[in-house]
Image: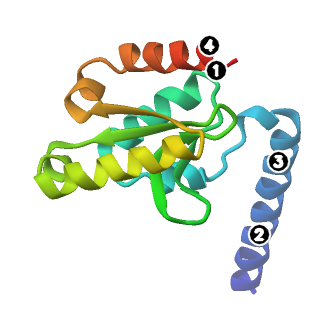
Amino acid sequence: MIEYLVFFGLIAAAVVLFVRHEIWEKRHPSQSLSFDWEYAKCESPIERKLYEALTWSGYNVKAQYVVPPARYRIDLALPQYKIAIECDGRAYHSTPEQKRHDQKKDAYLRRKGWKVLRFPGSVIHANVGDVIQQIEEEIRRTI
C-alpha cells in the first residue's frame, strides 16, 4: 500500500511542477529556456564567442550559413545585411592552400553581393567589443 502512495505522490508532484513550469513560461516568454540551434552549429570557441556577442547585441545571426548554390559555408552570417563574418583561427587559416581557398571563397561571396569581414581569433578573444563595433560600422554602411 505504501508503495502505491509513494508512486502516486511522485506522479502528483511531477504534474504540479509541470503545471507551474507551464504557467511560468506563459508569464515570462522572453526568459524561457530554449535550445539555440544556431549556437550549436558554431564550430570553434572564437565563433561561439562572437556569436554570443552579436546575439546579445540584438542581431539575428546564422552560423555555418550556406550561400546558394551551396558552394561555401560562412562561419557567421547576417543575411539581412548580406554580411559574411569569418573567424580565422591560426591553425586553419595560415597555410598557403587555406589562404588560397579563403581568397576564392571571398571572391565568390563578393560576386554574390556579400560583404566579407575576416577577424583573427586572437582579435576576437582580445577585444570582442571592437569586433562588434567594426561589424556595426559595416551594417551602417549597408543601410
Return the mark for residue 20: 3
Residue at 66% from the left image edge and 50% from the top image edge: 34
Q: Nearer the viewer, residue 70 or 90?
A: 70
Dot 2 amino acid type: Gly
Tag 4, which secondary structure? helix
Between marks 3 and 4 in the image, the one whose residue lies nearer the viewer: 4
Q: CA distance from mark 2 to mark 3?
A: 17 Å
Q: Check whether the beta carbons of the residues at disc 4 and disc 1 lie within 8 A of each other.
A: yes
Query: As drawn, is 18 to the left or to the right of 141?
Result: right
Q: Earlier in the sequence, mark 3 or mark 4?
A: 3
Q: Which residue is mark 1?
A: 142
Q: Position of residue 87 (x, y in %)?
A: 33, 40
Return the mark for residue 140: 4
Dot 4 amino acid type: Arg
Q: Earlier in the sequence, mark 4 or mark 2?
A: 2
Dot 3 amino acid type: Arg
Dot 1 amino acid type: Thr
Query: As drawn, is 60 to the left or to the right of 18?
Result: left
Q: Nearer the viewer, residue 114 or 73?
A: 114
Between marks 4 and 2 in the image, the one whose residue lies nearer the viewer: 4
Tag 3, which secondary structure? helix
